Amino acid sequence: MDRALATALQERFGNALLAPVRQRFDETEIRVSIADAIPTLRALHDEPAFAYEMLIDLCGIDTGEEMQVVYHLSSSQSGDWLRVIVPGIDRSAPRVNSLVSLWPGAEWMEREAYDMFGIIFEGNRDLRRIYMPDDYVSHPLRKDFYLADDASRSPAAGVRNMERVGTPVDATRSTALRKSPGA
Amino acid sequence: MAMTRDPKKALQAPIVTPNTLWTTDNPRAYGGQPLAEHPNLELARYDATGEGRADDARWSGALGAIPTKADIVLDLIRANSLWPLLSGLACCAIEMMSTATPKNDIDRWGMFPFRASPRQADVLIVAGTLTTKMAEPLIRLWEQMPEPKWVVAMGDCTCSGGRYKRSYSVVQGIDRVMPVDVYIPGCPPRPEGLIYGMMKLQQLIKDRRGHWPERAIGPTVPDGI
Amino acid sequence: MTTPLTKPSLDDPRIAIPAASEWYEPAPTAQTERQAEFLNLRDGEMFINMGPQHPSTHGVLRIVVKVNGEQVVDLDPVLGYLHRGVEKLCENADYHQAICYTDPLEYVASLFCEAAPVAAFEKLMDVEVPRRAQYIRVLTMELNRIASHTLFQGWMALDLGGITPILWSFIERDEIVDMLAALTGQKLLYNYYRIGGVNGDLNHEFMSRLGTWMSRAAAQIDSNLGLMNENEIFVRRTRGLGILDAATALRMGVTGPNLRATGVPFDLRRDHPYLVYPELEFNVPTRDEGDSLARYMVRIDEIRESIRIIDQVLHEMPDGPVMAKLPRLIRPRPGRAFGAVEGPRGAYGVYAISDGTDQPFRMRIHDPSFVHLQLVGPLTRGNLIADTMAVMASLDPVMGGVDK
């Protein structure tokens, strides 16, 4: 737990922080607004007192009421992980600025956040889906996307004869032709 | 920050994406309509007239039913030199590779040459989780394999979806998209398990069982199941 | 536009092939600027699709390569063929079940995939892991690191065309993996770490196999290396290929041996220490050249360092319990925690958010191979098609982790 880091962050970014610096074990956490996110990260990267040169992770969070983007950084000056949380992103139209100008390696991580949550990163020149197929309609990690309830009631097909207990199903094996695959 | 989990407090219209494979709008692809009415597939006519029976490498023999000595020899040949297609998708691929390496040598049964091209392969060992995005390429690979061909579902994910039973992007068992001859459970199955499964496949070939005679394009899980 | 799931194969004799070329897919439309740049073909260029099924793509990765003759002009990796929705499944499962879901991500280094969420959950629960369990974790993780690097060695040769080294690698790897199977019961997806410790103490079978292996591990590795290090084809194909400099690597978020091959000595075991690594003596091997050969050599040096760590751990292992006393139902207080370990591919981290219930609210898994695959394009530009595979093999991605 790096106390000197907490005081340095508080002094440098005091007015930009939305909440006091929190520390637990070897993690330090700050919160900044959407507008201040990129300038703060740029300052953390460029200034030699902080020297946060390594971007470890970029992810999206959906709390049910709002969305957040969380950055994890690492520096050679401090033994703590720095977590920068950008809260308060509107769930219905999430837009933040892209980190690609500072860390080009964030491009795919932002694509993943877009694919999973729908967060639009302005400035990312390649913001398309990365995991799901291109014509997929939903964003799976949102809290309003529900998984299938029960394995035996998967929405894809009904119940397989082996998963149903007690009721044999006469499985007719037709040699031709299904109506449609998988359904 | 308040975190809500209760679905009742969530949005009024949840987005529920069913775990189905893509169906197509294209009327030409045979995903979208019964195969019998497909304009380009002459399956019904082809099977009804029996015009392909002499050409393709299916079971032949006297009257199409009684195997001759040549067929028994052909079955032995096919069983003892099954060349798998390199179709390792995930973790089970590591166990498949481990089966090919000297400690659990699958070359003893003639199965070492894992072909990269489906045109040269006999058996498609699907090793690893099949996702909905990968389903189309895998079906294309299976279709490109020349007959006779067999499919082995290796691992829990290919048998039934496995540990990803509730996932939104995993095909719940490859028999939803292609006919399977041997199921090898396990996560991952030990190399000995894969070898046992391949020996079962050899038995199937020699006994002329399995899905081969009533091959249908598409999944063999009947409707309503 | 929905992609049709099944298209009849043109070789199926039961299909009447239409006159017009209706079966061919239309050219993809560009959705973004970068994709439009990529799809724009100049004179003499063409696309080659190294599709999801390929002998050397380390799993299901599709790379669309734009080539001018044999020279690669640009690359577009397409991921997602193994996306299983692990993060969503973890949100709907208990904390213990969530650890099981993370095993198959980097399936060759599966203990690291368990160590990171376990570290994050232990921070959330504020649990102290017993000393013996920490030593056992270090021991098994270093064994898994050696197994993974040995497999990397074989894969790298296989991607360059050599078949023998992978057979030898699997012999080595089978010994280590059988050792871990005697301990955990599983050869690949171990499911051994629990919140607060490990699932069972060391047993006699494991110790005897470990002793047999240790007695000749170093010599065996050196003899296996002679197959590749001094092989002129291997060295000439990888030296000077895909040079990555330190500044670019840091900007791209690279960690692990790929970063250490550029000269930056960043290792989580040193810089953000966890478990008992502060008490162990080991070096952090680095190289300066940053080419594929350097990335290969760094991993070989790491195997030797891991053997050194295992030796120290065996000498210093204390007695005691292997599992902390925890309630059966894991229900941490609301909070956030980030646990990261140094895996064989880089910094493998899990960011866990708890909301006070018995299911994690969000479990974000950061996999290093995901970030490293972005490098395949920039590093291969200007080289030949076969060099794509050499570069990718030297970056050592595992598609399970990339696609989650």
Image (tube, rainbow, N blue to C red):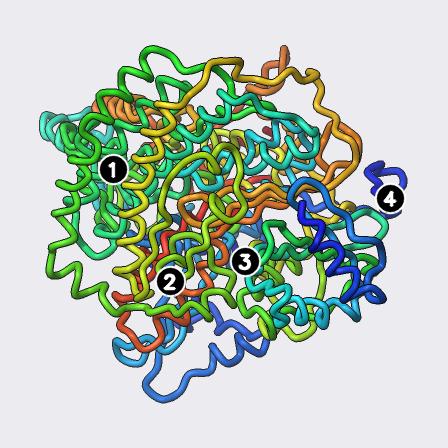
Say left or right for C314 vs C29. Answer: left
Q: CA distance from mark 2 to mark 3?
A: 14 Å
User: In the rendered image, which quarter contains the C terminus of chain B?
Assistant: top right
Please tell me how crowded label 1 is: few (under 14), some (14-19), or many (20+) other residues with Cα within 10 Å. some
As helix, strand or loop, the secondary structure at mark 3 comes to: loop
Residue B2, disc = 4
Which label belongs to residue B58?
Answer: 1
User: Which of label 1 and label 2 is nearer to you?
Assistant: 2
**Residue at the spot 31% in from the left edge and 57% down from the top edge:** C295
* Identity of the residue drawn at 70% across and 35% down: C360
Q: Which residue is mark 3?
A: A76
Disc 3 is attached to a residue of which chain?
A: A
- 2 and 3 marks on the same chain: no
In three-dimensional space, the C-alpha distance between marks 1 and 2, rounded to whole angstroms, equals: 60 Å
- The kind of residue tagged 4 is Ala
**Pointer 2 residue:** C263
Mark 4 and mark 3, same subunit?
no
Residue A108 rendering spot, x and y as whole percentages: 56, 62
Among the 4 quarters of the image, the one containing residue C334 = top right
Say which residue appears at 69% left-offset and 55% top-offset: A5
